[in-house]
Image: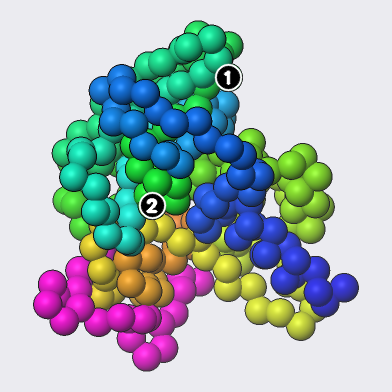
Amino acid sequence: MRALPALALGALFLCGAVDITRAAEDKPVRELDPVHVNAMRNPDVRKYKVILAGMDAFERHHALAPAADRLRFRLSTGKKDESPDPLAARLVGDDGFKLPIAIDASGRFEVPRSEAAADAKSELELNRKRRLYRTEPEIRTPGLPVNQRRLGDLRLECKVTIAMAKEEIPTFWVMTVNTLLLRTDWCGFFGDQDDFRWEGTSRKANFPFRAERKLAGAILVEGNRSAQLEVKEESFQVPIGNATWSDDAVVELTYAAAADAPTGTAGETPRTAP
């Protein structure tokens, strides 16, 4: 029984709670012909039904971030992009279905709802090699500084991320994780101080989010209360399942200096929110 925590957390990481790495089998990918996207072998692919699952989750849980009027996706990479061509994307499906998707200069884009795209079993393809870029949901309440993230926005991002992950992995794994966590709301697992503790374990699981730059620190703030969060490189860990923090709490990010940005975890003994 003591192995169950590791199995559960391992399943969460595999299915995408930390990083939506496709668990589906790699299949041969057709070469793209030009439609505002330059042809390239092995393009990055995301099934449209997976994106739709994220869009549905955004609508179901929109109350977490009522001022955020849209779900956008952000492309990020930790690798060097050596392509001379600008980033481009499109939906491609059966019977020749094609729909270009506009990507702005910051690597952000929106995906439209399209019955035709769904019927064609479309996939979102980038004009880059597979796994060069991550496709991540991004939800931001307007008016906040770029170094601040509202907790409700992050909670909604988690809902979208998990919904997409559940659509990608086999039903068996979804049911397995549900059973091990004793819940279907996987986001609530991260930081829930009232939940059970497995024998021999310390429950300090927090949900990781990525910033656009290397971080020196992150603090969760609400009123006169604050808590230091763990950071590593561009990632910051948030106790999104901790109900003692409201959706209006804010994570304040401190970016590392551009030249000698520190690596690893900020501080010697970082603590997570209680």
Horizontal side, residue 182 vs residue 203: left or right: right
- Does label 1 or label 2 sit earlier along the sequence? 1
Relative horizontal placement of residue 90, taking residue 170 as reference (left or right): left
Could you say where residue 13 lies in the image, as x and y percent from the top left?
A: 60, 60
Element at label 1: loop
Looking at the picture, which amino acid does disc 2 mark? Leu
10 or 246, nearer to the observer: 10
Residue at the image point whose x is 75% and y is 66% from the top: 7
Nearest the eye: 98 or 103: 98
Q: Quadrant of residue 89?
A: top left
Mark-to-mark CA distance, 1 and 2: 23 Å
Spot occupied by residue 271 in the image (x, y as percentages of width and height)? 44, 79
Residue that badge 1 annotates: 121
Task: Name, please, the residue furthest toward the right.
Answer: 1
Stretch in magenta: 250-274
Tell me the residue that label 2 is attached to. Answer: 132
Question: Residue type at mark 1?
Answer: Lys
Q: Residues within 10 Å of mark 2 (few under 14, many from 20)?
A: some
In the rendered view, tell whether residue 39 sits above or below residue 21.
Answer: above
Q: Quadrant of the N terminus?
A: bottom right
Closer to us: 158 or 210:
210
Where is residue 36, by image quadrant?
A: top left
Determine the secondary structure under disc 2: loop
Residue at image location 46% in from the left, 21% down from the top: 92
Residue 173 in the magenta stretch? The answer is no
Q: Residue at x 13, y 72 (%)?
A: 258
Give the answer, above or below, for where 53 lies relative to 6: above
